[in-house]
Image: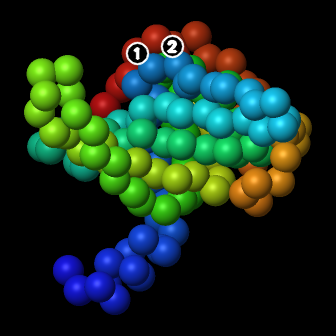
């Protein structure tokens, strides 16, 4: 990939829709900021395995992501990124990430979407909406 193509790819925003593989992790900072992370599985079609991404969000988008539980379907808009790390056995591995600027919890069965409360500082601007509808079948991740 050329340097120009790589720069365009890093600055592009993409939309992902997937299901949370586990409950989100959230951290608060002394300055009032919030950071949340969650793994999501994005379906590639019937005959292909799902692709897994780590979603990382800050402040308002993190406030929405922090409430995500395993199995919920979410929409994420953000920049793709990769993070290289060493496994415990010393091997190098790469994690595919989405640096989210927008996170929305999608309703499982109809329902209205309501705006999420704004929290945290203004480190990264984000529009964040969430559905507060509960579902009894959130324990299974259907694909």
Q: Is 59 placed above or below 126 here?
A: above
Indicate the position of residue 107 as horizontal and vertical percent values.
63, 35
Say which element carries label 2.
loop
Q: Is 40 placed above or below 88 here?
A: below
Indicate the position of residue 81 as horizontal and vertical percent values.
39, 57
Q: Which residue is mark 1?
A: 140
54 and 116: which is toward the camera = 54
Tell me, yes or no, if residue 125 can be seen here: yes
- Pick the quarter of the image with the N terminus: bottom left
From the viewer's perspective, tell me whether residue 105 is left or right of residue 84.
right
Residue 137 is tagged as 2
Q: Residue at x 81, y 30 (%)?
A: 30
From the viewer's perspective, tell me whether residue 125 is left or right of residue 48.
right
Residue 6 is tagged as none
Neighbor class of circle 1 (other Cα within 10 Å; few <14, some 14-19, many 20+) is few
Q: Residue at x 52, y 53 (%)?
A: 99
Say which element carries label 1.
loop
In three-dimensional space, the C-alpha distance between marks 2 and 1, rounded to whole angstroms, equals 6 Å
- Pick the quarter of the image with the C terminus: top left
Using the rendered view, name the quadrant where residue 77 is placed: bottom right
From the viewer's perspective, tell me whether residue 140 is left or right of residue 115.
left
Q: Is 95 placed above or below 100 here?
A: above
Q: Are marks 2 and 1 in contact (CB under 8 Å)?
A: yes
11 and 48: which is toward the camera = 11
From the viewer's perspective, tell me whether residue 104 is left or right of residue 32.
left
């Amino acid at each position: 990939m050329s340097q120009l193509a790589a720069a365009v790819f890093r600055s592009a925003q993409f939309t992902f829709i997937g299901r949370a593989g586990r409950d989100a992790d959230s951290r608060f900072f002394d300055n009032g900021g919030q950071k949340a992370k969650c793994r999501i599985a994005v379906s590639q079609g019937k005959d292909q395995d799902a692709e897994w991404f780590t979603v990382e969000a800050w402040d308002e988008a993190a406030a929405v992501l922090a409430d995500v539980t395993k199995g919920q379907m979410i929409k994420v808009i953000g920049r793709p990124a990769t993070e290289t790390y060493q496994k415990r056995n010393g091997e190098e591995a790469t994690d595919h990430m989405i640096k989210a600027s927008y996170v929305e919890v999608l309703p499982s069965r109809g329902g209205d979407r309501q705006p999420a409360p704004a929290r945290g500082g203004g480190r990264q601007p984000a529009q964040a909406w969430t559905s507060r509808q509960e579902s009894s079948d959130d324990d299974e991740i259907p694909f």
